[in-house]
Amino acid sequence: MDVNRTLLSSRIHILRAEHKMTQKQLADKAGVSRQTIISIEKGNYVPSLALAYTISKIFGKTIEEVFIFED
Amino acid sequence: MKLRNRTVYYAIIVIVGALLFVLSEIVGEIDSFWGGLGLASFIFATLRLLQILRWKTNKNYAEKRNITIHDERNIYISKEARSKAFNYSVIIEAIIIIIFTALNMTDYTMVLSCLFVGQLLIYYVLYFILRKLA
């Protein structure tokens, strides 16, 4: 199974709006490029567990609250 | 590689490159092939040294480069591109081997077949090593 074909939706764009955070600001905090955040938001890229954890921590949420895996 | 080690590494390439160029093009002691190689190495290493200098002096640039290099999506794309490049080159080699065999070009077929088997061998060795490590 290709992990990057797994359906993954995230609530990142909603959480960013709640925290009044731009994609660039989130990318800088997570230590990744803005393009990576865009791809995750669009569902084109499945982040690693470490990055998912980092992003969730930035928003003060758990991974399950930020990312939704669909079988 | 650490920044200091990289600086030393590229400085050595600059010196060796310049030396090869001088020995070939100015002194005429060695073949012109080495002059070309020396000049190319000199230019490449000088550009790398300038990049390292910018890295050391420009904090913004260093941060940007760090993110670009360590960004996991970039790493994923790079690995995916390399793996696809390997897949396609093996398929293309196999097709060329079949064509050369049909054309009775045995020498070329032998060389390409060795390359083909070598690549597959390296792949399987790496696969088993990585499987043990993961």
Image (spheres, coloured by chain):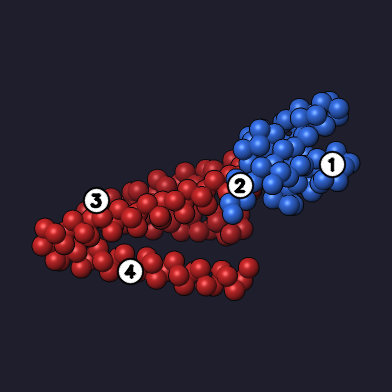
Chain colours: A blue, B red
Q: Which residue is mark 3?
A: B25
Residue B84 point in image, percent of width and height: 44, 51
Q: Which residue is mark 2?
A: A4
- SS at mark 3 in the image: helix
For label 1, the crowd category at 10 Å Cα-Cα, with few meaning under 14, some 14 to 19 and many 20 or more, is: few
Closer to the N terminus: mark 4 or mark 3?
A: 3
Position of B90 with respect to B110 (left or right) is right
Contact? badges 4 and 2 (CB < 8 Å): no
Nearer the observer, B34 or B112: B112
The crowd level at tag 2 (other Cα within 10 Å; few <14, some 14-19, many 20+) is: some
- CA–CA distance in space, label 4 to label 2: 30 Å
Q: Amino acid at mark 4?
A: Val
Residue ID for mark 4: B117
Name the amino acid, label 2: Asn
Quarter-of-image position of residue B31: bottom left
For disc 1, the marked residue is A65
User: Where does the image place residue A20, in percent across and percent down from the top left?
Assistant: 84, 25
Do discs 2 and 1 share a chain?
yes
Crowdedness near tag 4: few (<14), some (14–19) or many (≥20) residues, C-alpha within 10 Å: few
